[in-house]
Image (cartoon, helix red, strand yellow):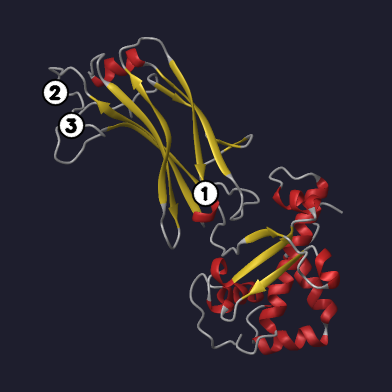
């Protein structure tokens, strides 16, 4: 690495025999940079782990640091959304005095409630203490100098807006509503807002098999069927709610990332560039055809039944 304002120093970016870092895993699945996290929602725990091996003798040879130097291995995450949050995670110090290989498991917990769209997970090996000075001009001098780093990006929701999904107690609802599976709440200006603030999906916490099925990251056929029904029903409910809203019009300029803009794009992909009034008329005149089109759009139970 070359740091502005400081002399150049030897880093470990061009070598493959000093550090051996396995892929991050999420649960039991390896993390592939740029891939989507299946089933992600704002309540999902994102606990990542990876194994990393370091070879102090080779690191000393390459960096020209002496045995008294101490390195620091750090992890961090950085969100990429409307509000770009981030935080440092766990790590450990590595004294270069030893010669034997050092193996360590890194753990990083990312709070789903604070991220959206995508999150970058970073690992870095930095100089913590230089120790006894070295005569080599190629050795790193400043604490915090990055000797090695890598990063992966997890896609949480692609480019599509996503509402919060919460498991709650339905016992305070009225009558038969207490046993409902789920429902969608939308605020007064929900079509103009991002779904993370304009709506919330509530799951009946007493339906434990339902909650487990919707949260499954490696779904069984039963789980996959429940997830398919859920996605179709939520999508159908939002489309119906939008078409029933007189303010959902062709000339309304909805902001990027808003529910209104997303739903309008969905309807165009389903029915082409016809006015919303014609879509409302089709739903009223041919409700069966309208429903079949929505099922096809949501790949309702595709490959399951």
For the point 62% across and 37% down, which residue is it? 27
Q: Secondary structure at mark 2?
A: loop
Query: Which is closer to the viewer, label 2 or label 1?
Result: 1
Q: Are marks 2 and 1 in contact (CB under 8 Å)?
A: no
Taking 95 as reference, is 159 left or right?
right
Res 299 visible: no
Q: Which residue is mark 2?
A: 137
How far from the left and from the top, in percent, is residue 12?
32, 26
Mark 2 burial class by Cα count in 10 Å: few <14, some 14-19, many 20+: few
Which quadrant would residue 59 be assigned to in this image?
A: top left
Q: Position of residue 158 (x, y in %)?
A: 55, 57
Q: Position of residue 77 (x, y in %)?
A: 44, 45
**Measuring 69% from the left and 79% from the top, which residue is drawn there?**
241
Q: Which residue is mark 1?
A: 111
Q: Above or below — where is 184 with respect to 79?
A: below
Q: CA distance from mark 2 to mark 1?
A: 42 Å
Which disc is residue 8 wearing? Answer: 3
Q: Is residue 124 left or right of residue 49?
A: left
């Amino acid at each position: 690495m070359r740091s502005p304002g400081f002399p150049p120093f030897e880093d470990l970016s061009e070598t493959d025999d000093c550090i051996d870092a396995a892929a991050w895993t999420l649960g039991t699945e390896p993390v592939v940079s740029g891939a989507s996290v299946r089933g992600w929602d704002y309540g999902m725990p994102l606990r990542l782990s990876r194994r990393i091996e370091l070879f102090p003798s080779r690191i000393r040879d390459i960096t020209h640091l002496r045995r008294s130097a101490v390195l620091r291995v750090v992890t961090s995450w950085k969100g990429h959304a409307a509000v770009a949050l981030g935080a440092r995670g766990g790590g450990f110090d590595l004294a270069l005095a030893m010669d034997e290989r050092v193996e360590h498991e890194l753990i990083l917990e990312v709070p789903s409630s604070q991220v959206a769209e995508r999150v970058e997970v970073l690992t870095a090996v930095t100089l913590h203490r230089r120790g006894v000075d070295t005569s080599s001009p190629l050795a790193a001098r400043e604490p915090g100098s990055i000797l090695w780093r890598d990063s992966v990006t997890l896609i949480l929701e692609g480019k599509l807006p996503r509402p919060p999904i919460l498991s709650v107690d339905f016992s305070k609802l009225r009558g038969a509503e207490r046993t409902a599976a789920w429902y969608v709440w939308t605020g007064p200006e929900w079509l103009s807002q991002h779904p993370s603030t304009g709506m919330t999906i509530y799951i009946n916490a007493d339906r434990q098999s339902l909650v487990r099925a919707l949260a499954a990251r490696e779904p069984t056929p039963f789980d996959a069927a429940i997830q398919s029904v859920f996605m179709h029903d939520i999508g159908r409910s939002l489309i119906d709610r939008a078409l029933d809203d007189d303010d959902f019009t062709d000339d309304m300029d909805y902001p990027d990332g808003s529910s209104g803009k997303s739903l309008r794009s969905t309807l165009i992909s389903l029915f082409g560039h016809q006015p919303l009034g014609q879509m409302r008329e089709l739903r009223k005149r041919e409700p069966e055809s309208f429903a079949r089109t929505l099922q096809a759009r949501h790949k309702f139970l595709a490959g399951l039944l």
